[in-house]
Amino acid sequence: MSIKLKLAALGLLFCSMNAFAQKTDKFMNEIVNYDEAAVPSYVLPALLKTLKGRLVNNSSAWEKQRRPEIIGLFEENVYGRTPKKFDSVRYRVTNDVPRAMEGRAHLKEVAITLWNKGKSVTVPVVLFTPNNRKKPVPVFLLINNRPKRNTDPTRAVKSTFWPAEMVIDSGYAIAAFNINDAAPDKKDTYQHGVLDQLFPEMLQKPDGMKAIGTWAWTASRVLDYFETNPDINAKKVAVVGHSRGGKTALWAGAQDTRFAMVVSSCSGSSGASLARRKYGETVSLINKQFGYWFNDNYKNYSNDVNALPVDQHMLIGLIAPRPVYTTNAVEDRWADPVGSYLSVVNALPAYRLYNPQLTLPVTFPATNKPIMQSVIGYHFREGKHDLNLYDWAEVLRFAGMQAGWK
Ligand code: GTR
């Protein structure tokens, strides 16, 4: 049974939003639905029922049976298989500035070189750790899908997409890697990196990982590095991503339970938003435009989304009981804000296996009124498709409420 939202308040909200907007649009020869009334009725795949039909009512059955089963379904049908091992790794500090940011932070640029079967790929990481801290600190790792100037180690460019000073002044470390160093974000060249060098077999198989799978795998390799850095508390690593990076952050956090927190900004289709709602970007549209992000099997669902054995609430459920924060923006209907919040609401049963008291409002949250219910956070803010200072400020506030993050 899926949980539906109370649409009365929502209707009002979206009427005002839609006052200037059309209810449909056309993109790549498809009608794009922006009309809540035209969302088809659908039944979500059961989060807490195994493929053999067994109901899961405790965290042990969830962790031993259902969780691995759901990961396998996402691997097989959406993001592709994640490699379980590789041969070796080397970490090399390429730039070390103990008194960066006017002395507030220690900058390290680290080259992570990953080897498999005699070939290698190097992924550079930028990391600032606060200087006034005595203990190892939690870290926010951004999966950067924008140009590298957004994570400028010199701080000549200060981007609101990665506000390093703000995070440092909150007492946390901040890091980033760029997705293009692992798998170029282009349909004709995505394979030139981790895929063709380290795991060429993935490119041959219909369930092999492609770009998003590769970026998520790489995020875990950065976490491996954090485990070797004594300034970092590797038990408190938040993985953060926006849009395609947000889809990746969810998939990385869903699989790798070492990620202690997941932050997904405006991740939309195949991220936090429910596929079955067919609102804004659909599975069909994302496969047409960005097919190289997903495995080949995902294409089978372009015209038959109800046949998918998963929906995106299950991806968020995989993060339980760890903190998860998702965001949407008023001017980003393409990413289906209501569908994202519904995912979170429908992921709740997995969280309740750990904390039966946990609840969420069933009414869609008002604009700029974040919800922070224990380990689940969500906001719908004014403005555009972006990861901005408002988002970071709320995420930092949410982090401050979590055990071990202060
Ligand atoms: C859009 C795409 C979305 C989202 C976004 C982004 O064009 O349709 O799924 O991922 O790009 O990454 O900025």
Image (cartoon, rainbow, N blue to C red):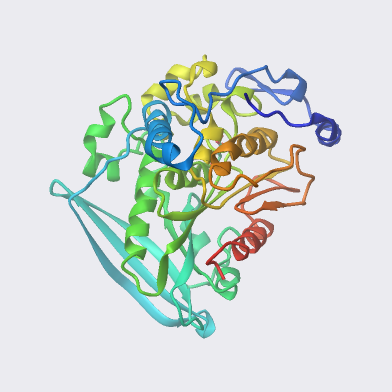
Q: How many discs mark residues in the rendered view?
A: 0
Q: Can the viewer see residue 27 in this picture?
A: no
| Residue 171 location, quadrant | bottom right
**At which x and y percent is residue 342?**
66, 34
Q: Residue at x 53, y 21 (%)?
A: 284
**At which x and y percent is residue 55?**
49, 27
| Residue 344 location, quadrant | top right
Work out which residue is located at the far left of the displayed protein and give it.
118
Q: Residue at x 23, y 46 (%)?
A: 85
Quadrant showing the C terminus: bottom right
**At which x and y percent is residue 286?**
52, 28
Quadrant showing the N terminus: top right
Is residue 46 left or right of 14 when viewed as pictured?
Answer: left
Ligand 1: quadrant of the figure: top right
Is residue 12 left or right of 122 when viewed as pictured?
Answer: right
Q: Can the viewer see residue 133 in this picture?
A: yes
Is residue 268 left or right of 69 when viewed as pictured?
Answer: right
Foreground pick, 218 / 396: 396
**At which x and y percent is residue 327?**
64, 47
Foreground pick, 33 / 38: 38
Q: Compared to 206, does 193 lie above or below?
A: below
